[in-house]
Image (cartoon, rainbow, N blue to C red):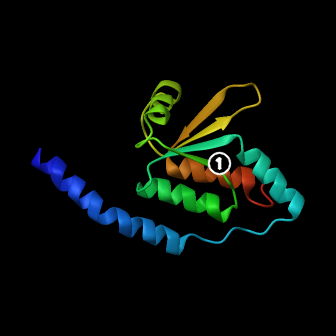
Amino acid sequence: MIVRYFFRAVRLILTPFMLISEKLTTPKAIIRNHEQQQEAERASAKLALYQYRACPFCIKVRKEMARLGLPVEKRDALKNPIFRQELEQQGGKIKVPCLRIDQENGQYLWLYESDQIKAWLQQRFEPGATS
């Protein structure tokens, strides 16, 4: 119990610093022509990122989304019990970050692990990459 309170206190102290650091170090979005950016925005409308605000792995994914200029819906699975329930029941586990990808067949692909999410985003949205 003491250990739990210790880590809560550490999290409370570090969270503002992590969020400020994210704000200061988030890269600017890449430049696309108007049509390419509209296509990227249409495609990113089929994505949702389940995340915790102060999770370092979630921050890593959000920074990549910002770099790629993707307005992806962010769902806080810590503060919103509905998103948490979706993550557990549909995704299979409560673990963040998790990218939900709406597929053409009406099914969802649930992609966990920040490095896998970043690689998928880069492969799909990086200019010059094959979709």
Instruction: Tell me the quadrant of the picture where the N terminus can be found.
Output: top left
Q: Residue at x 16, y 55 (%)?
A: 6
State the image quarter where residue 108 is shown.
top right
**Where does the image place residue 71, in percent across and percent down from the top left?**
68, 54
Asked whether, in this view, residue 39 is left or right of residue 103, the answer is: right
Q: How many marks?
A: 1
Q: In which quarter of the image is residue 35?
A: bottom right
Q: What element carries label 1?
A: helix
Q: How crowded is mark 1: few (under 14 residues within 10 Å), some or many (20 or more)?
A: some
Q: Where is residue 87 in the image (x, y as percent from the top left)?
A: 49, 33
Query: At x 72% / y 32%, what residue is drawn?
Result: 103
Q: Which residue is drawn at 21% across and 58% down?
A: 9
Q: Could you say which quadrant of the image residue 14 lies in?
A: bottom left
Q: Where 101 sits versus 68, above or below?
A: above
Q: Which amino acid does label 1 sit on?
A: Trp
Residue at 49% from the left image edge and 35% from the top image edge: 83
Q: Mark 1 points at which residue?
A: 120
Give x and y (percent) for residue 28. 65, 72
When the figure is inspected, residue 71 is found, relative to residue 77, above or below; the finding is below
- Is residue 25 at least partly visible in the picture? yes
- Residue 24, percent across and down? 51, 75
